[in-house]
Every structure is written in C-alpha cells, then in structure tokens.
Image: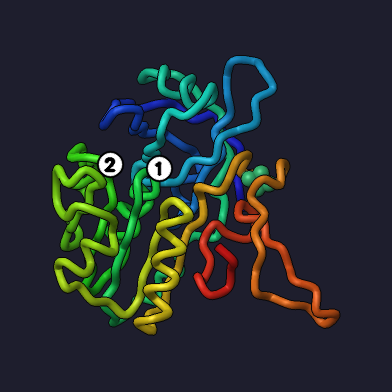
Amino acid sequence: GKYKELAEVLKQECIAPDIYSMWLQTDKIAEQAVPGQFISVYSNDGSRLLPRPISLCEIDKEKKALRIVYRVAGKGTAEFAQYKQGDKIEILGPLGNGFPLERAEGKKVFLIGGGIGIPPMVELSKQLSGEKTVIAGYRDDRLFLKEELAQNAAFYAATEDGSAGTKGNVLDAIRENKLTADVIYACGPTPMLRALKTYAQEQDIECWISMEERMACGIGACLACVCQSKEVDDHSHVHNKRVCKDGPVFLATEVEL
Ligand code: FES
C-alpha cells in the first residue's frame, strides 16, 4: 500500500552544490519501502504546485526514517531545501516498483549511478548481498555519498572534468578498471542509460534501469513520463508505459530510450 503522511524533518544538510540530504520521520512509509522506490513530496507554500518525486536514498525500518537526496532544480525543491529539523512536510509513498533484488543472487553486480541517480544506489548497496561494485558518475570531485557507498561495495568514480577517478563517464571507468559483472542496476540521465543498455546487450549482461529522471509529478497526473515499451498487444499496438506508475525500474531491453 501507499500512505499520505505528514513527516517530520529530522535533519537536513547540503552535501554538494545544489544537492541536499534530508532525513524524514515517517509513520508507515519507511517500513514498507524497498530500494529503487520513491516518495512524492508536496509543497507547503499553498500554491498548486504538483508534488516532486524524490527517490529513496536510505531506508531505516527500525527508526521508521527515510533519507532522500535531491537536487534543487525549481520552485518546489528550492522550498524543500529551506526546511529545518522539526518542520513538517507532506509526503506520499512508497511509490514505484523498486529494483528486483532477487536477480542479483549469487551474481556479480554493478550498481551504476549518474548525478542525481546516485542516491538510490546507497540503499540498494546495503540490501544486496554478494559481490558489488559501485560506479558513480559525477561532474567534479564533489563525490557526494561516496562514504556510504564505499562502505558496502567496491567504489569507482568517473568525473566529467577528470578531477577525481576516471575522466569521462561510467563506461570509461568500467573499461579503465577492467570491471565485470553479470547484472547491472542503474539510475541516471537518459544518455547514460542508453549507453548502458547498448553495453549490456553487447556483453550479454542483464540490465535493470531506473528512469526516475524522466518523472515530473510522480503520481500519474502529468503524463510527462510516458515511454514506449517493447510490449505489443494482440492487435499489435505498442504499449506506452508511465515511468511513475509502471516503473521507475524497467529491464533495459523492454523500453525505448
Ligand atoms: Fe507525471 Fe508520471 S510523472 S504522470
């Protein structure tokens, strides 16, 4: 199920330019959530802004707390960044399907995040057992969440400006470090997902992608997130999928990127 709650802000900090980390005290949402899911966060300012979908970075079931890490990229998220400890915020969740953890059993896994697609890899790296390698793509040497990721997995960074790790993208880091895997879980911008899909097909690797960067309202209301799937019905109609309702995680081969 999903729940609408008034969650209390436990902690908020800026962890890189325009990137904020917020811990929220929830009632039921944290207990129900799985890696790769998201919540929709509502604006408190009384305007009719649609909620913002924000992916879960960490899930603390014992404390019933959730950590979200998000980029300030507009009015709504700029408002969220102002919140302080003790403030209340309306959220809906958990939403979306999450990553299929069972596909990684006994396998070597890549967890690949690009930019604001990196946060979901933290909880995923905690919950997956087995041999895990994180490859994270950043702009520069502000390697946010590196500490958390390196705790649970081998960690490699790629940076656009070459100031840390491999200069280039996540695939450059994979090649430079001669990394291999049987299964990929990835989240990030569409060009990165497209490149990974091709790479996975060439290498015959199962590849799961979260297309959360495509989402706008997160609640099925705006249709900004529609993507074409490979699914064809009896009348040979191609089925469109809403990333926020049917995803955000898909098998890469099942969607057009
Ligand atoms: Fe608005 Fe999916 S994000 S309908």
Q: Position of residue 119 (x, y in %)?
A: 35, 47
Q: How is the image coloured?
A: rainbow
Q: Position of residue 257 (x, y in %)?
A: 55, 62
185 vs 249, left or right, is left
Q: Is mark 2 within 8 Å of ligand 1?
A: no
Rendered residue at 67%/54% (across/down): 226
Residue 37 in sight from this viewpoint: yes
Which amino acid does the dot numbered 2 rest on? Arg
89 vs 13, left or right, is right
The tag on residue 223 is none
Q: Nearer the viewer, residue 83 or 210?
A: 210
N-term-proximal mark, 2 vs 1: 1
Rendered residue at 61%/37% (across/down): 4
Considering only vertical position in the picture, is 170 above or below 14?
below
The tag on residue 139 is 2
61 vs 246, left or right, is left
Rendered residue at 16%/66% (across/down): 176
Considering only vertical position in the picture, is 82 above or below 199?
above
Q: Position of residue 145 (x, y in %)?
A: 24, 44
Mark 1 lies on residue: 64
Q: Secondary structure at mark 1?
A: loop
Which amino acid does the dot numbered 1 rest on? Lys
Q: Position of residue 187 (x, y in %)?
A: 41, 56
User: For mark 1, does the 10 Å Cα neighbourhood hold few (<14), some (14 to 19), or many (20 or more) residues?
Assistant: some
How far apart are the alpha carbons under marks 2 and 1?
33 Å
